[in-house]
Amino acid sequence: MRTEVGSFERLEVWRDGHVGWLVFDRPEAGNALDAVMFRELEHAWLALDADPDVRVIVNTGNGPAFQTGLDMVQVAKDKEALRAVSRQTRDFELRFTAWQVGVRKPVIAAVNGVCAGGGLHFVADADIVIASSDATFTDPHVSVGQVSAFETIALIRRSPMEPVLRMAFTGRHERMTAPRAHQLGLCSEVVDPPEGLREAAAALAEKIARNSPTAMAVTKKALWEALERDLTDACAAGAKDLAIMWGHPDQEEGPEAFAEKREAAWTPLDHALLQAAEETQS
Amino acid sequence: MSYGSYETLIVERQGHVGWLIFNRPEQLNAMNNTMRDELADAWLELDRDPEVRVIVHTGNGRAFQTGVDVMEIATDGVGFERYRDSMEHFDVHFTAWHQQVWKPVITAVNGICAGGAFHWVADADIVIAASDAQFFDPHVSVGQVVAIEAIGLIRRMPAEAVMRMAFVGKYERMTAQRAYELGMISQIVDPPEQLREEAQKLAELIARNSPTAMRHTKKALWGALEAGLTDACKNGAKHLVDMWGHPDQEEGPAAFAEKRDANWAPLSPSESRARPNRSSGSDAPAG
């Protein structure tokens, strides 16, 4: 059962059961971000994050490419968009990935083909990454006289650094394959044949949707914030996140459901608790 | 541009590729005082040479490198005390990172890589290895602490493998295959004799990219190891913006559209370095 979530020109956004889908829909241009998609992404992420029936989000692309980054030629034609991109880049206030807009639900990137340059944002900022067996990863920035920074900075926190530096410096002259990305832990599953990608992503998302939404949101917060801190500080902050969940109804429901061999009936995502968790850290 | 003469190193250029080669094969390329001093100069010479866009670092003989020259330590009466001052102040100058070289550096591990040799694995951008290369860290087996090299490594690869090497010491060796699986290296060259040829090829591919964009990218990514994620991205934004308006940003897309290699602007002279070079009187160990 597919229920549309909002209406977009360059994206397809819907919910199926507890799984929200955000699909790049500019297949004729490698799903490159034009001015319209650039604006729409923020709204799409926030709509899925706000939808109480969505527990987990899958991000993928229509057509042969996953994402190929900013379409600078197209963006340059829209003066307002060009100013926005320039200003948001300069100030690092970009708002087109789940991490950038503060999505609290688990996000799975399902890489369905080439993922190039700025497309790596959506890999670096996802929680879980899976890929079709024909997916490839490449960072052509320095081959066209551009600096590679945000995507690769985030990637070196979640992958061995050497392969990221190699990707940054070989530019468009080399591509990493999906099996190599899997070996390195950049993705956790390679789907073969490639046509099975969405089915595999849905199956994974449905497993995740069986877990406590609130516990997952606090877990996500603790783990991403740990990337901002040194080890001991990150653990001290994480300890507060652990404690804030104590006494929450999901902590009784979980063991009871387990004992009774039934699915847990979780409470909806607890916004008040998340708000309190934010405040304990500040 | 011709390079200075070196006793323990070979420093040369092939096209846009600078080569820095350890040349004490009988001592398994162990670092003595002379080599330590020469390394500081060699990195800076290659960094200064405008023809060099990428640097490859490897060794002559059956070892890549095996740390400090223990014979020298044991026989000249000074021992490890020679390194105390520079190490206490972490004022060392024998790797590309120590010397703030912002051109891409490829380490090509040609054989045994032991102990202090990991400095040049940890401080390189890209690492490739001959299929018969072996990696191990014997520090604790000879009563030494390992710190700097392993600290660098656990930021760039899974920590367990680094801890295992640190504690098993000389009693186990990691193969090139395992190093590849872990993402410590990105390429295994087989047969091993082709290592330099493959390194030159990889370097030439990298030399086709914008030298200035690569310099800023390298600064952004190594700088990111010093900060939290958000701060690192904010600092990275400065490097992105520094490139805006640079002629390479027009040349890149133009060359792409015309299906030709880009004609990049040369690097502007390097900014002054954050750290003084060895003329400030550094004494440094490789392990």
Image (cartoon, rainbow, N blue to C red):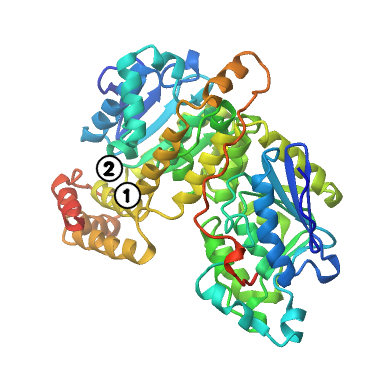
Is A123 in front, or is B205?
Answer: B205
Q: Amino acid at mark 1?
A: Lys
State the residue at coordinates (31%, 24%).
A84
Q: Is residue A96 left or right of residue B31?
A: left
B128 relative to A95, above or below: below
**Looking at the image, which is closer to me, A277 or A208?**
A277
Badge 1 or badge 2: first in the primary sequence: 2
Q: Quadrant of the C terminus of chain A?
A: bottom left
**Quadrant housing the N terminus of chain A:** top left
Location of residue B162 by image quarter? bottom right
Kindly identify the amino acid type of the residue bearing the numbered disc 2: Arg
Residue A141 vs residue A124, the one in the foreground:
A141
Q: In the image, residue B245 lies at what x, y percent?
A: 46, 25
> In the rendered structure, the residue with mark 1 lies on which chain?
A
Q: Is residue A1 visible?
A: no
Which residue was labeled with disc 2?
Answer: A104
| Residue A58: percent from left, percent from top | 38, 33
Q: Which mark is residue A220?
A: 1
Report whether residue A195 is seen: yes
In the displayed structure, would residue A280 be above or below residue A133? Answer: below
